[in-house]
Image (spheres, rainbow, N blue to C red):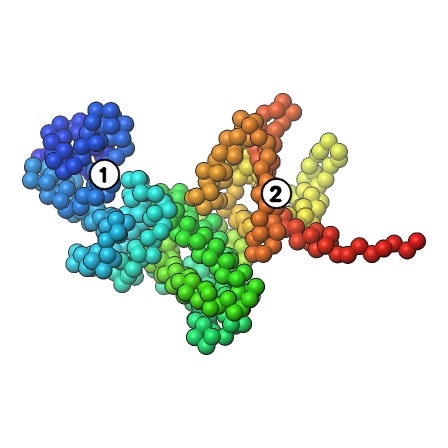
Amino acid sequence: MKELDLNKSVAELVREYPELRDVLASLGFTDILRPGALQLMGRIMTLPRGAVVKGISFDRLAEALEKEGFVLKNGEQQKRQARLRDYIGRLHRGEEAAEVRKDFVQNFEDVAPEEIAAAEQELIKGGVPVREVQRLCDLHASLFEGHIETKPAAPKGEAEIDDLPAGHPLSLLRLENEGLSKALTSLEQALGKGDMQAVAAETAALNAIRSHYAKKEELLMPFLYDYGVTGPSQVMWGVDDEIKKELGVLTKTLKEDPENLMIVRGRLNQVITRIREMIVKEDKILFPLSLRFFTQEQWYQVYRDLFEMGMAFVDAETLPRWQEGEQWILSQQAPPEALDGRVKLPTGELTVRQLQGILKLLDVDITFIDKDDILRYFLNEGRIFSRPLTALGREVYSCHPPEVIPVVRQMLLDFKAKKRDHMEVWRRIMGRPVGVRYLAVYDEQGEYMGTVEFVQDYQKALDHFARPVRPQKG
């Protein structure tokens, strides 16, 4: 029996079954079968990924292989996953969503969140740019709408998502989404009435979504990365950024003149739709995936950071607390005597308690990463960018959206090579003038030790210097 494991690379399969070359050539896999390409790309490309790249349906691929006597290992599951990739790939090639959905409904009663995640990941691994997957993310959601498993089996005997304690992190994030849905409805009602002032106010209030998305991106997604679940995170983070950017533009436009509603009404309706679709994707894909993978210890860590990062669209004071999480937080507190330890510096010494007291007075965000790009310390007193404790000990790249990572990586490479020793970014965030400064840190011998980031809101300084100077009495 000639059994093909489709998780193996094309090069491995051809080496195992040389006759496979002719079958693949007949299907159009000519480029990758050239000797040089087979040694290079063939080592990382699988047949399902190659089929997506070449626009070949998996059913056609499987039929050709089986006709030549090959048997697919875990065939039904492989076919199921490949069909999902094929449906999403057809959307990316511009096929009408209604036609693709018709084929999907014929072959699938339901689809698990992991299957959607794996399909998106395989597309990205197969060469489809993250931005392209992200661009059609909303179409993916509409394709599977009504067919995503709503009650997935929980792992390790843990609770289903609907049965979680009221104060569990996922329960709190879902409460935020309920509040967000109500805020969207209020905006839609104001739009219906043509109340320009109310539309401007409701749009501005929606910017609290930044806090909700930050918790999702910095508390849930890094842990999913650890488990190899990268597709949804890469795609969702990019869509989140698009929504935040559009909300910022619309808020500014309506603040300048509420009558601009005439110009931006269509864009407002579009961003409302995208936010509602993201709520569905979180509830049906991201949250169930997190529940399936995270350990109890990880949920405790998420809970610890949740309130510190700020709650959105809910009253934080009246939210239920998770007693298990509260007890865990108490157990993690440093003993009081640890704060009496001393830090000796060239110009004096301080107790840890004194040093903490001084640092809390600095209205600046400070982040330090070591020479291996691991986040080792942060101070969040400026409250410009949230930073959870779960970020400590992680690579700095997990704290940034996918499209920014190449910029961060190049900057750090330059610092290590001493091509430059600083970088400054000045921009407005929610209308406030913010400076972000990155500085390379070297020791006495000039060896690179890491990078420190300072983030500060300069509005107070600008306001001060903008005041008219009073003439001095003479």
User: Image quarter for residue 446?
Assistant: top right
**How far across and how far down the image is residue 199, in percent?**
50, 70
**Callout 2: SS:** strand
Amino acid type at mark 2: Phe
Q: At 11% across and 31% down in the image, what residue appears?
A: 22
Q: Quadrant of the N terminus?
A: top left
Q: At 72% across and 54% down in the image, what residue appears?
A: 466
For discs 2 and 1, the disc positioned in front in the rendered view = 1
Q: Name the residue carrying label 1.
A: 50
Outermost residue toward the bottom? 193
**Callout 1: SS:** helix
User: Image quarter for residue 419?
Assistant: top right
Tell me, yes or no, if residue 32 can be seen here. Answer: yes
Q: Earlier in the sequence, mark 2 or mark 1?
A: 1
Q: Is residue 122 above or below residue 372?
A: below
**How far across and how far down the image is residue 179, in percent?**
46, 67
Cα separation, mark 2 vs mark 1, equals 45 Å
Q: Name the residue carrying label 2.
A: 454
Q: Is residue 341 above or below residue 464?
A: above
Disc on res. 4? none
Left or right? Give the position of 52 relative to 220: left
**How far across and how far down the image is residue 150, in percent?**
30, 61
Left or right? Give the position of 6 relative to 336: left
Judge by depth and name the residue closer to the eye, 355 or 59: 59
Judge by depth and name the residue closer to the eye, 262 or 177: 262
Outermost residue toward the right? 474
- Alpha-carbon neighbours of circle 2 within 10 Å: few (<14), some, or many (≥20)? some
- Tally the marks: 2
Q: At 19% across and 59% down in the image, what residue appears?
A: 102
Tell me, yes or no, if residue 365 can be seen here. Answer: no
Amino acid type at mark 1: Gly
Q: At 17% across and 46% down in the image, what residue appears?
A: 57
